[in-house]
Image (cartoon, rainbow, N blue to C red):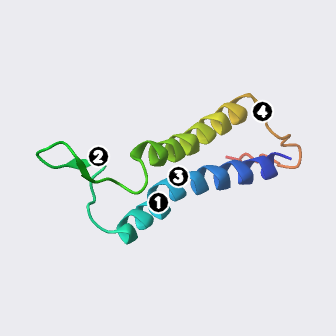
Amino acid sequence: MTDIIDTAARALSAGLMLFGIVVLGIVEILAGEPYSPVPITNEAGDVVAAPMISPEIRTAFVLAGIAVLGLYAAYRFVAPLPDDRDVSHETMAD
């Protein structure tokens, strides 16, 4: 059971962070210039260029991935360890 949870938690957190950083970064590059995280205005105050994807959205994906890792760490901390009955511990003789 814990193997499934381990794999799912790692995959979900990695997927969220990669989506927020890599995929949305590529989308921003393909959208073209400007590469600014804030809207660019002219001297009159009119917005002349804005990012295609808000930085808050990208940050939310990355933070969600980190939160999943935190929940996974808390789960591993409180989950019981598997029994080591099949493992034999040998001591070297003098």
Q: Count every numbered label the image shows and give the total.
A: 4
Q: Which residue is mark 1?
A: 24
Which one is in front in this view, the residue at disc 2 or the one at disc 3?
A: 2
Residue 58, position as x, y percentages in the image = 46, 49
Q: In the displayed structure, would residue 27 be above or below residue 54?
A: below
Q: Which residue is mark 4?
A: 79
- The alpha-carbon separation of the residues under discs 4 and 3 comes to 25 Å
Disc 1: CA contacts within 10 A as few (<14), some (14-19) or many (>=20) = some
**Which is more N-terminal, label 2 or label 4?**
2
Residue 13, position as x, y percentages in the image = 61, 49
CB within 8 Å, label 4 to label 3: no
CB within 8 Å, label 4 to label 2: no
Q: Quadrant of residue 71?
A: top right
CB within 8 Å, label 1 to label 2: no
**Which is more N-terminal, label 1 or label 3?**
3
Horizontally, residue 13 falls left or right of residue 80, namely left
Disc 4: CA contacts within 10 A as few (<14), some (14-19) or many (>=20) = few
Question: Which residue sits furthest bottom?
Answer: 30
* Residue 41 showing in the rendered view: yes
Q: Which residue is mark 3?
A: 17
Q: Amino acid at mark 3?
A: Met
